[in-house]
């Protein structure tokens, strides 16, 4: 078990405290860090939201949320109750000054402390909340602001938010969350690439045929239809999570692990992406929307039925990206993500080129190219697909085999939730796993022409049955280039999400 190094005592204020993210992710993450004594016990967690409820009622809500979202053994004793007793709650309005004085009085009791203002609200409140933090004198030198994604819904709105927040908080105090960066297995991509000599030498267009990044979910929009229908899969997942994965896979080795050294390299990849012009979207992208179907043997309704009206929002997107650089020229990066797919799985596949010439007769077996597959979630692990000799007599016949490592079996440890790591990093002031302003804006700049192409197109998203791997056009996107999506998932039954 790794040693837990406590962070400094801090005051954490969560805005949007009655929302789904706070109750499902932030409070359970804080509870776990508190329980492990990484978060000093005199730290304060202060909840703030518009709803006027009594602090006791709020504590009861959090207590229920901890029990609902954590394994029973983690909330069985007295700890969950003790944690909740420490929470304070302020009803305040992010846009007006109402209710802020009481919060200011509480924070003034410990002016030297690290203050983390976590904005788990709609992004249009980021500016007004930051203005109020400033107006009430709460932005101490030790203050940081944490912003949840999405930062805006296009480049202009992202810039406007960054400008507003930037008037109050310096970049080093600004923590833009992409929670995928907090996942252990995503950080492991850096370890894989830069702590092993063998991969880096193979990481080039000379050796790599193409790369696939799949982030599949079996859940639907889960009560977030209001937000989701305005966002869609491209904004909700691809602009941030999938592009960040692509950056970590494709970037040059940074000169150090310093936040800016890593982020400089990621930014170069975002800037090297070949733009997909609006008129190219029908060739290079596929968007889909789920219809009714079955997942894990259970019938599920279509997106429009869940929403209650027809919609042109995509719940699936697949696209072909290219990086204009010496290392990657000519190597396609196929990205796909969607809801109501057969199972929850996030995987990266690096497929290497075929052998230049086969010594083996065709009857010996079809030679399959090597693949490095990194399973990010669930069943975290890696495998390398190889060709080997089929054991036994009868000549030199071949068969595919795998070098496998399951992280759970190898390390036998619980993987902390991404938010546990990210929350503690924000207290430490370490921005490495957070998105810098220019990264967010470069990602929007690349995504925007695709959105424009879709808006200008008369075509609606292609329907796909819930429980399938998306529209057939997504299969055609890679097959017409002589490739196939990697779909040899095992352990299918174990990878359904709770809500699916
Ligand atoms: C969020 C998206 O950022 O990531 C959700 O808004 C999505 O739509 C979620 O379900 C997936 O995260 P995870 O950690 O469950 O893979």
Image (cartoon, rainbow, N blue to C red):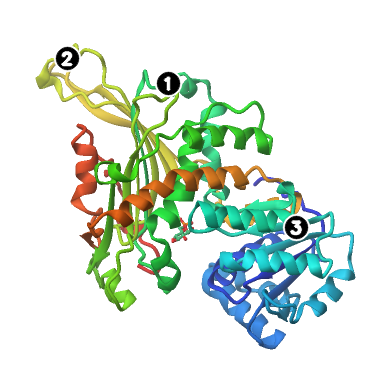
Circle 3 residue? 168
Residue 459 placed where, x, y %? 22, 57
- Above/below status of 386 relative to 433: above
Quadrant in the picture for residue 350 = top left
Q: Is mark 1 on a helix, strand or loop?
A: loop
Q: From the viewer's perspective, is 142 left or right of 275?
A: right
Q: Callout 3 environment at 10 Å: few (<14), some (14 to 19), or many (20+)?
A: some
Q: Which residue is drawn at 89% across and 63% down?
A: 111
Q: From the viewer's perspective, is 109 left or right of 294?
A: right
Q: Are marks 1 and 3 in contact (CB under 8 Å)?
A: no
Which is more foreground, mark 1 or mark 3?
3
Q: What element carries label 2?
A: loop
Q: Does the residue labelled 3 lie within 8 Å of ligand 1?
A: no
Quadrant in the picture for residue 499 = bottom left
Residue 120 placed where, x, y %? 61, 66
Circle 2 residue? 360
Q: Callout 2 environment at 10 Å: few (<14), some (14 to 19), or many (20+)?
A: few
Q: Callout 1 environment at 10 Å: few (<14), some (14 to 19), or many (20+)?
A: few
Q: Is residue 444 shown to the viewer in this render?
A: yes
Circle 1 residue? 202
Disc on the earlier residue, 3 or 2: 3
Disc on the earlier residue, 2 or 1: 1
**Placement of the C terminus among the 4 image quadrants:** bottom left
Q: Which residue is drawn at 25% across and 46% down?
A: 282
Residue 230 placed where, x, y %? 42, 66
Disc on the earlier residue, 1 or 3: 3
Q: Gap between marks 1 and 3, in whole Å?
A: 45 Å
């Amino acid at each position: 078990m790794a040693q837990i190094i406590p962070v400094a005592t801090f005051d954490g204020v969560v805005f949007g405290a009655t929302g789904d993210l706070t109750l499902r992710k932030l409070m359970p993450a804080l509870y776990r860090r508190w329980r492990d004594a990484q978060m000093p016990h005199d730290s304060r967690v202060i909840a703030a939201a518009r709803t006027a409820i009594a602090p006791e009622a709020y504590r009861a809500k959090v207590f229920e949320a901890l029990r609902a979202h954590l394994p029973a053994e983690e909330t069985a004793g007295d700890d969950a109750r003790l944690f909740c007793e420490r929470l304070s709650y302020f009803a305040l309005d992010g846009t007006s000054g109402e209710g802020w004085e009481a919060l200011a009085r509480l924070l003034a009791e410990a002016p030297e402390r690290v203050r983390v203002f976590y904005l788990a609200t709609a992004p249009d409140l980021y500016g007004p909340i930051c203005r109020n933090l400033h107006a009430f004198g709460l932005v101490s030198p030790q203050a940081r602001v944490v912003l949840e994604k999405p930062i805006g819904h296009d480049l202009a709105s992202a810039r406007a938010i960054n400008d507003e927040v930037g008037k109050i908080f310096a970049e080093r105090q600004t923590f833009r969350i992409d929670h995928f960066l907090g996942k252990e297995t995503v950080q492991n991509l850096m370890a894989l690439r830069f702590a092993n000599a063998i991969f880096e030498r193979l990481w080039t267009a000379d050796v790599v045929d193409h790369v696939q990044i799949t982030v599949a979910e079996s859940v639907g929009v889960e009560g977030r239809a209001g937000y989701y229908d305005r966002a869609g899969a491209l904004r909700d997942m691809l602009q941030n999570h999938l592009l960040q994965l692509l950056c970590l896979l494709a970037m040059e080795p940074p000169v150090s692990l310093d936040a800016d050294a890593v982020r400089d390299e990621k930014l170069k990849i975002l800037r090297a992406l070949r733009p997909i012009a609006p008129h190219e979207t029908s060739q290079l992208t596929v968007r889909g929307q789920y219809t009714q179907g079955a997942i894990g043997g259970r019938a599920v309704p279509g997106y429009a039925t869940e929403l209650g009206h027809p919609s042109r929002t995509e719940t699936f997107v697949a696209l072909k990206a290219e990086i204009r650089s010496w290392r990657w020229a000519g190597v396609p990066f196929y990205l796909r993500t969607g809801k109501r797919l057969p199972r929850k799985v996030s995987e990266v596949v690096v497929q290497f080129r075929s052998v230049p010439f086969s010594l083996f007769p065709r009857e010996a077996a079809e030679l399959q190219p090597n693949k490095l597959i990194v399973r990010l979630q669930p069943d975290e692990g890696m495998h390398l697909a190889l060709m080997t000799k089929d054991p036994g007599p009868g000549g030199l016949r071949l068969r595919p085999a795998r070098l496998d490592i399951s992280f759970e079996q190898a390390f036998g440890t619980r993987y902390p939730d991404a938010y546990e790591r990210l929350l503690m990093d924000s207290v430490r002031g370490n921005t490495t796993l957070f998105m810098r302003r220019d990264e967010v804006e470069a990602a929007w700049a690349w995504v925007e022409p695709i959105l424009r192409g879709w808006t200008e197109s008369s075509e609606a998203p292609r329907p796909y049955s819930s429980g399938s791997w998306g529209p057939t056009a997504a299969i055609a996107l890679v097959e017409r280039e002589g490739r196939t999506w990697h779909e040899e998932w095992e352990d299918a039954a174990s990878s359904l999400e709770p809500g699916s």
